[in-house]
Amino acid sequence: MSSSIVGILLAAGQSTRFGRNKLLHLLNDGTPMVLASARHLHKVLPQTIVVVEDASNDVAKILAPEGVQVVENPLASEGMGTGIACAVANSPDARGWVIALADMPCIPTGVIQAVVTGLEQDAGIVAPVYKKMRGHPVGFSARYAQALMQLHSDEGARSVIQANSDSLELIETTERGVIVDFDTPGACRT
């Protein structure tokens, strides 16, 4: 893989609060949630890895024709931290990573590009902020590769951000989509 910034879409969640695989839930335009999220990330980052629980499941099948790299995480049940570690390990030459969540399909490509630009301008960690709430996606420069590959819990990269808060660059946005995730079927109507 070339030394560029890589998109990581975490799509191996268990959907426990949703009642079924929420990533297959159709949005108002008929697009499965995971596909909308993947397309937004992939549009900005041609090298995008989507981490799934099972490379033969329906989520992986929907993503196969999209030109993204689908990677199976055998430790998916241990939490999203393992998905981040898996994706970073699969892109060791990356200059950085932009990590997005598959249940957040409303993140505009302009916000993703702003995070990428921050990394390209040597920021260590970059995240959007909407009305004082930190959102997604979050970008990490390659200097955090080891810390990201050691993640193992369900808190994602929160511990890396907290340990390196002095390196966090926040980008103000008016785009509410950076904080909107769909954890229940009712949330999808908002």
Image (cartoon, rainbow, N blue to C red):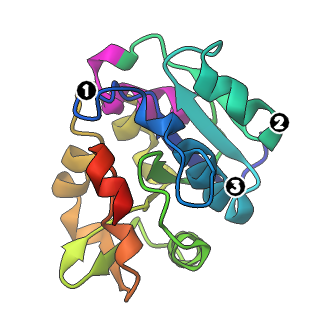
- Name the residue nearer the viewer: 114 or 94: 114
N-terminal-most mark, 3 or 2: 3
Identify the residue under disc 2: 65
Q: Is residue 24 left or right of residue 144?
A: right
Residue 150 % position (x, y):
33, 28
Q: Which residues are magenta?
A: 77-89
- The amino acid pointed to by label 1 is Thr
- The amino acid pointed to by label 2 is Pro
Indicate which label's residue lies in the foreground, 1 or 2.
1
- Name the residue nearer the viewer: 68 or 33: 33
Dot 1 falls on a residue whose secondary structure is loop
N-terminal-most mark, 1 or 2: 1
Dot 2 falls on a residue whose secondary structure is helix
Identify the residue under disc 3: 42
Q: CA distance from mark 1 to mark 2?
A: 27 Å
Identify the residue under disc 1: 16
Q: CA distance from mark 3 to mark 1?
A: 27 Å
For residue 129, which quarter of the picture? bottom left
N-terminal-most mark, 3 or 1: 1
- Does 84 appear in magenta? yes
The residue under the point 34% across, 32% down is 80
